[in-house]
Amino acid sequence: MGNYRFILSGGGTGGHIYPAIAIANELKRRYTAAEILFVGAKDKMEMEKVPQAGFRIQGLWISGLQRKLTLKNLMFPIKLMHSLWNARKIVKQFQPNVVVGTGGFASGPLLRVASQKGIPCVLQEQNSYAGITNKLLAKKAQKICVAYDGMERYFPKEKLVKTGNPVRANLVNRTEDKQEALKFFGLNTEQPVLLVLGGSLGARKMNQLIEQELSFFENLGLQLLWQCGKLYYSEYGQHEAEQVKVKAFITEMDKAFAAADIILSRSGAGTVSELCLVGKPVIFMPSPNVAEDHQTKNAMALVQKDAALVYKESQSNSEFETMFEDLMRSQELQKALGNNIKKLALPKATEHIVDEIEKLLH
């Protein structure tokens, strides 16, 4: 029987949405007759990204608690009751066989309702530090798929399965040639390339650092492939030059990774998982403005395994220069970091998560 019904819920950020889409695609590949429904938060990016990926989505009127007392916080109990009521309606109408939550506020009401009705639930936690929604739902879930060791700090040990995080299929089967990739971005083959990744919207502090260090990079004989983010392109696009390629957003990430010799990146969970597959020396510059500072915790989990370096926004430019120059001058360090990060790759994460879902069907 292949006409199963699955609900996937998660969102707010790409880190919750893209894993859910990857899982949905794998479910569809195995069960072509399956019906799949996404449930997200009404005004968040999943309402746009999920239909673009070819799936149906329904929105709940839900948002998180702000850290300080605001009008939005006073609305939270009303939104929660409204979302629980709507989630009940969705579950009753759709009658899923399994519900999957990938984190974010919308997955809270939906998985709570499903578990109350005895529907098997699977959680997927991307970070090394568990999100609040997943921690609250853990008791009700049958399986919790994680990407890091030591997650029994947050979840019941007997429910844990280390699968890794779903990543884009074209990165799992990377065949991109370095020379071709350099040509694609208009870079030369003589000089090493630093790839700068501040996320799709961009990272102000990272962009400021790169701008201030342009002559430092030039003196080291480096080329730059710099994704500055959509929000900042008008500000930093002016630095485009023969050795500095500035992009609002890089769609061809497989080519960008092939061209790179060293990578400077944020450390969101999905990005970290992709960089493990890529297997090149990485300096993480975590965003301190995310829930529970999980980007720093993700980066430090790799630093502890000698698989990456970390530079914090609070550090000085001269500390960055020292760290970067040491890395540039040591082929040995570059090789060690590349090899160690590659060892942490879990390329079959999506399949292993869907294997766990399948066990609950039978």
Image (cartoon, grey):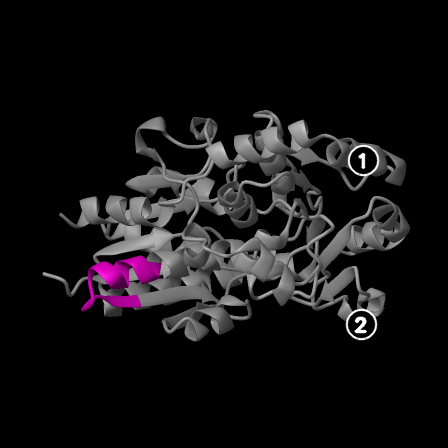
Task: Give me the residue at 68% from left, 61% from top.
Answer: 71
Q: Nearer the viewer, residue 172 or 192?
A: 192
The disc at residue 293 is none
Q: Nearer the viewer, residue 304 or 294?
A: 304
Residues under labels 2 and 1: Cα distance? 29 Å
Amino acid tagged 2:
Ser
Residue 123 coordinates in the image, percent (x, y): 37, 46
Amino acid tagged 1:
Glu
Which residue corresponds to mark 2?
A: 234
Q: Which residues are magenta?
A: 24-36
- Earlier in the chain: of badge 2 and badge 1, it is 2
Residue 203 coordinates in the image, percent (x, y): 73, 55
Is residue 44 something one can see in this rendering? yes
Q: Is residue 185 above or below residue 302?
A: below
Label count reads 2
Q: Nearer the viewer, residue 208 or 186?
A: 186
Q: Which of the 4 image quadrants contains residue 246?
A: bottom right
Which residue corresponds to mark 1?
A: 325
Task: Give me the residue at 50% from left, 39% from top.
Answer: 130
Question: Which class describes the residues within 10 Å of circle 1: few (<14), some (14-19), or many (20+)?
Answer: some
Task: Give me the residue at 17% from left, 50% from top.
Answer: 361
Question: Which class describes the residues within 10 Å of circle 2: few (<14), some (14-19), or many (20+)?
Answer: few
Is residue 106 something one can see in this rendering? no
Residues under numbered marks 2 and 1 in contact, where contact means CB atoms less than 8 Å apart: no
Asked which secondary structure carries label 1, the reply is helix
Asked which secondary structure carries label 2, the reply is helix
Residue 124 coordinates in the image, percent (x, y): 40, 46
Looking at the rendering, in which quadrant would you find the N terminus?
A: bottom left
